[in-house]
Amino acid sequence: MSENPWNSIPTPTNDEQIRAHLVDHKHPWDLFWAVDTERRPILLLTYGVGDGDQRRPPLLRDIEIESAIDPDDDKNILRIKLTNSTHLDIFYQFCLDIVNSTVNSRSEHEAVATAISRTWRWYRLLRGGHDGLLSIEQQRGLIGELLVIERLLLTTMNPVASIDSWKGP
């Protein structure tokens, strides 16, 4: 990694919980490099209430992504935190991609939507992509589930109750 933007941030006290500095004063949106009291690296995007994207972010291994309201200034915060420091170099590239992809956003809402979309693109890339089709294993599972419904549930229940009772594999 050529530079670590989190190195220059002092460790916050327990009262502060995080310390941050602006990613780039020329960037149109409020993106911050931050660290918590355990020195875990964080990328923050602050935005106005009501400007957020309603899609949930993906669940990523060793990265926490959450949105919360900052009680100090009534702004929303999209927080992306690395929980396993062995992935710092990859996390840095991940964060740079989010920073670079949001620079041309025309609104805070679009910047948040772009940031969340980028997290989903990384998720799909790292898990092997997705073409919208079911894998062979997923197809077999679906066929098995349909057979259970047809051969077991429909013999004792009406079709609506059969489908409503099915909770998944």
Image: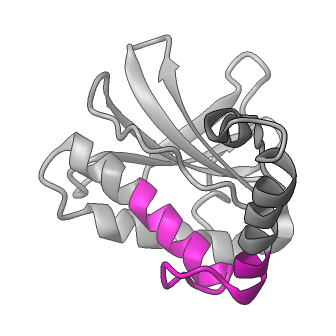
Q: Quadrant of the C terminus?
A: bottom right
Whether residue 3 is visible here, answered yes or no, is: no
Check the image and report above or below for 70 versus 118.
above
Check the image and report above or below for 53 versus 91.
above
| Residue at (48% x, 73% y) in the render | 121
The front one of 137 and 146 is: 146
Check the image and report above or below for 81 versus 124.
above
The front one of 138 and 131 is: 138
As for residue 123 lying within the magenta part, the answer is yes
Position in image of residue 104 (x %, y %): 17, 64
| Residue at (23% x, 50% y) in the render | 110
| Residue at (51% x, 44% y) in the render | 56
Check the image and report above or below for 10 versus 14.
below
As for residue 91 lying within the magenta part, the answer is no
The front one of 124 and 44 is: 124
| Residue at (65% x, 81% y) in the render | 126
Position in image of residue 164 (x %, y %): 68, 35
Whether residue 115 is visible here, answered yes or no, is: yes
In the displayed structure, does residue 131 sit left or right of residue 42? left
Q: Name the dominant secondary structure of the magenta segment.
A: helix
Outermost residue, left side: 106
In the displayed structure, does residue 4 sit left or right of residue 145? left
Q: Magenta segment, which residues?
A: 116-140
Position in image of residue 75 (x %, y %): 37, 22
**In this figure, which colouring scheme has been used for the structure?**
one colour
Q: Quadrant of the N terminus?
A: bottom right
Q: Quadrant of residue 93?
A: bottom right
Count how many numbered circles sit on residues in the image.
0
The front one of 66 and 77 is: 66
Q: Quadrant of residue 157?
A: top right
